[in-house]
Amino acid sequence: MADLDRTRVPAAAPLAWEYAPAPESRDVVRFQERYGLFVGGELVDPRSAEWYSTIEPANEDHLADIALAGEEDVDLAVRAARDAFENGWSTLPGSERAKYVFRIARILLERSREFAVAESLNSGKPIKESRDVDVPIAAAHFFYYAGWADKLEYAFPNRRPQPLGVAGQIIPWNFPLLMLAWKIAPALACGNTVVLKPSHTTPLTALLFADACRQAGLPPGVVNIVTGDGRTGAAIVRHPDVDKIAFTGSTGVGKDIQRAIAGTGKRLTLELGGKAANIVFDDAALDQAVEGIVNGIFFNQGEVCCAGSRLLVQESVHEQLIAKLKRRMGTLRVGDPLDKNTDVGAINSREQLERIEELVESGREEGAEIFQPECVLPERGFWHAPTVFTNVAQSYRIAQEEIFGPVLSVLTFRTPEEAVEKANNTAYGLSAGVWTEKGARIFWMAERLRAGVVWGNTFNRFDPASPFGGYKESGFGREGGRHGLEAYLRFE
Ligand code: NDP
């Protein structure tokens, strides 16, 4: 005992509490100098002869040249998809299709570091998110839907499910690989072929995915990736030989697409914006709720359609909760997306940063009180400090419009009825969160909240088996789970 006591020399107190930077290596991914379009199993130069540069939002450095697909390129991609659909893919037994989808899932995991680093470089999101959320959940979707491919008759008994044909899929820049997985995995499992357009700011993981398709031996033309901007997306929407459009993005573009395909018989699913209420009752575990609030609005810099961007706090705990939240915000690390200790990365584009800044300015002008923790933002690239607004009225733009950035608006309530009324006072209806120790209250709230997903004592949880989608201006149709299959099937 005495010996042990003698060896207990007190450790020297650290001089600083800084974490080691430990950046993930850029060497795990090598981008080509330029990427053509992935059509019929090959990367081909665009007929449009147009190219653009994709950059790293964290420092505005050039990453690669990317093809900008025109109308003729989209037409070639749709033809390749139709060919693949008619000459083998749609009649392949489900158990055979499953093998390809399963193989893709395996490859995503085997190459997960490369995908995670590429995603963080091109989108600006922290590596701990791309590594622990985007890539594993993307792979999980392929695993999950591989399991359904030979069981469609059991999923829909007596309804004779059939694939739709060629699916045109248009995805945004906030979760480039994950949104690709949400769209491609169920489409392939159901026997469709696809033409997918990533956002022009984040094409790189979709192009790495094209390589994964080749590696999996996927028949040419089953997956086609056409890079480009909004015009490329519009050409997919207009193409007469596309049977279904699946879109994730802004409500404005969603409405344009709905108008464009009205009367054509094309099927449509829309996953649009949100302005979720994260509701904290006075009996909630407040420290746990603070973590949920931080995750709800600062995960992926708040560039999340289901972000908990409106915090509704019961009046009796408002002061206490906001003090805790401000303290917690002071510990958030903003900076290099490739540093594994970073909590808040770069905003995806200059355009998005300007949109966020404009809305923050409107919040100040309308009279809300702003708080930002002290943090030094990098000089190059697109950055925004974590921000919380208190004294927010329901009519303020920051309480109504989707900011899509690390900006939280706080409102208060007294009764559960008032919380429901305020939470539902929005044009959107994608998600909500409820924090309380009473399970019965969570169910009571969930029944009344007009939101596609309601989380209880947690936030931003995603599972391939669970359907996701909105009400009202957040769109229609569900992705994920058995519901997600229905969007890619017709019934005889
Ligand atoms: P968009 O809706 O413009 O972009 C989504 C996708 O649609 C992108 O691939 C885009 O291409 C494409 N697209 C753009 N115009 C058309 C068109 N006319 N026809 C077909 N496809 C088109 O979103 P933004 O990038 O402009 O973001 C604006 C706002 O939208 C954000 O601030 C946020 O509020 C919301 N948003 C919501 C998302 C969600 O997950 N629900 C995701 C992204 C944005 P390209 O990017 O190449 O222009």
Image (spheres, rainbow, N blue to C red):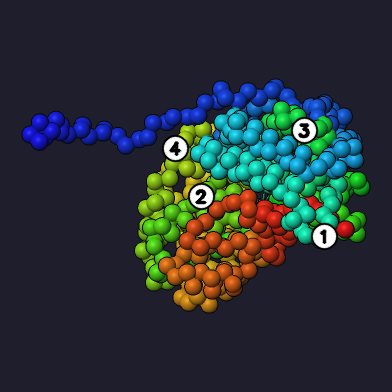
Place of residue 175 in the rendered image (x, y in percent of width and height, measured from the top left): 63, 44
| In the foreground, 280 or 71 | 280
Q: In terms of sequence position, does the residue under pointer 1 or pointer 4 come before the other?
A: 1
- Circle 1 residue: 159
- Depth check, mark 1 against mark 3: the one in front is 1
Task: State the CA–CA distance, disc 1 to disc 2.
Answer: 43 Å
| In the foreground, 84 or 172 | 84
Within 8 Å: ligand 1 and the Cβ of disc 3?
no
**For numbered disc 2, what is the local secondary structure?**
helix
Disc 2 + disc 3, Cβ < 8 Å: no
- Depth check, mark 4 against mark 3: the one in front is 3
Task: State the CA–CA distance, disc 1 to disc 3.
Answer: 28 Å
Place of residue 432 in the rendered image (x, y in percent of width and height, measured from the top left): 56, 62
- Mark 3 residue type: Leu
- Mark 2 residue type: Phe
Q: In terms of sequence position, does the residue under pointer 4 or pointer 3 come before the other?
A: 3
Place of residue 408 in the rendered image (x, y in percent of width and height, measured from the top left): 51, 57
Determine which of the numbered discs, if any, sits on residue 218 in the image.
3
Task: State the CA–CA distance, disc 2 to disc 3.
Answer: 37 Å
| Residue found 77% across the figure and 39% down from its top | 96
| Residue found 59% across the figure and 72% down from its top | 447
Toward the left, the furthest residue is 2
Label 1 CA crowd tier, 10 Å (few <14, some 14–19, many 20+): few
**For numbered disc 3, what is the local secondary structure?**
loop
- Residue 271 located left or right of residue 159: left
